[in-house]
Image (tube, grey):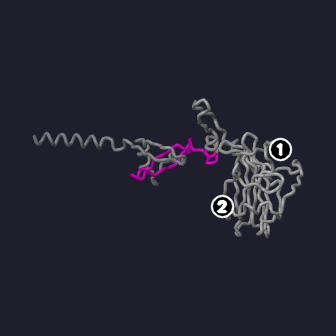
């Protein structure tokens, strides 16, 4: 029994020693991020061992490079025919970046997917204007409005305080105070804090309609000191996430304490800018 065990051990030892140069596998990640597996051939291992410097002449041939196996002292040969310059790889990645799709639900509830040219989108973003249209004031009618000196004294106590960095929504309704005079213009009044340097006004365009307001600055006693009949200087187009709007910014001058925003008309009418002036809508007043 003991001799049989010794015989089996000898057979196994001979099998292990009969293939000392059976080769092996070397796995690594190349410069492009690909997983590469290189097989070491038996004859290659023998030639490597016969070389004085550990590297056979076949390993320094054209289109090849020597890679040391970190798990052993063996040196393996790897073909580099598939390697490309980094500029070529970056160009391919950039081309793939342009191949994108946008998916959304249309008005019929269907899921729609369409290609999106990112290159064209970036070029359009770099060449597009500032996103607004400067309004030509020459297209508006010059106006003259006679106002009473005491046009606003009766509602100054209702003035909401407008502080720097504060944003207020301005709306008009049947309960809005009106200016004293021949025509009862609906209005809103604000007491401007001393920290305010400028006031910005936005009027939203809905179905080509907007509130065409005028602004009236009053001094500490409520006496009119400046009338602004066209406060808007820019027009922003409508986008998928917001209405279009008109916007204007006014610098505050010394002595201006109260700001009155009022509608200079009682019924809707056509404006001189291709839009319709209405009595219902929204304004946003922002102080800086």
At x 80%, y 60%, the residue is 151
Q: Which secondary structure, mark 2?
A: loop
Q: Residue at x 83, y 59 (%)?
A: 227
Q: Quadrant of residue 40?
A: top left
Q: Residue 5's spot in the image, x, y percent?
A: 15, 41
Q: Which mark is residue 30?
A: none
In the drawing, what numbered circle is on residue 271? 1
Q: Is residue 19 left or right of residue 110?
A: left
Magenta-highlighted residues: 61-90
Q: Position of residue 128 (x, y in %)?
A: 75, 47
The quarter of the picture where the N terminus appears is: top left
Using the image, determine if residue 171 lies above or below residue 269.
Answer: below
Residue 46's place in the image compared with 225, above or below, is: above
Q: Nearest the camera: 148 or 128?
A: 148
Camera-nearest residue between 207 and 115: 207
Q: Quadrant for residue 109, please give it.
A: top right
């Amino acid at each position: 029994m003991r001799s049989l065990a010794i015989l089996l051990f000898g057979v196994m030892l001979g099998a292990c020693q009969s293939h000392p140069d059976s080769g092996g596998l070397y796995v690594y990640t190349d410069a492009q991020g690909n997983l590469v597996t290189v097989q070491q051939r038996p004859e290659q291992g023998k030639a490597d061992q016969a070389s004085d410097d550990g590297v056979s002449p076949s390993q320094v041939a054209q289109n090849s490079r020597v890679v040391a196996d970190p798990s052993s002292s063996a040196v393996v040969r790897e073909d580099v025919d598939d390697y490309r310059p980094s500029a070529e790889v970056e160009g391919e990645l950039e081309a793939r970046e342009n191949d994108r799709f946008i998916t959304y639900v249309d008005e019929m509830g269907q899921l729609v997917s369409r290609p999106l040219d990112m290159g064209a989108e970036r070029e359009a973003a770099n060449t597009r204007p500032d996103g607004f249209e400067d309004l030509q004031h020459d297209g508006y009618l010059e106006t003259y409005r006679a106002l009473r000196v005491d046009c606003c004294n009766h509602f100054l106590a209702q003035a909401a305080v407008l502080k720097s960095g504060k944003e207020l929504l301005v709306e008009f309704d049947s309960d809005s105070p009106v200016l004293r005079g021949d025509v009862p213009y609906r209005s809103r009044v604000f007491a401007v804090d001393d920290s305010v340097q400028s006031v910005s006004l936005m009027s939203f365009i809905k179905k080509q309609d907007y509130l065409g307001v005028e602004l009236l600055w009053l001094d500490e006693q409520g006496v009119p000191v400046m009338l602004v009949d066209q406060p808007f200087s820019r027009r922003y187009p409508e986008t998928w996430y917001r209405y279009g709007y008109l916007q204007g910014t006014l610098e505050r001058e010394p002595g201006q304490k109260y700001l009155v925003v009022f509608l200079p008309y009682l019924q809707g009418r056509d404006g001189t800018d291709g839009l319709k002036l209405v009595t219902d809508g929204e304004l946003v007043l922002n102080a800086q």
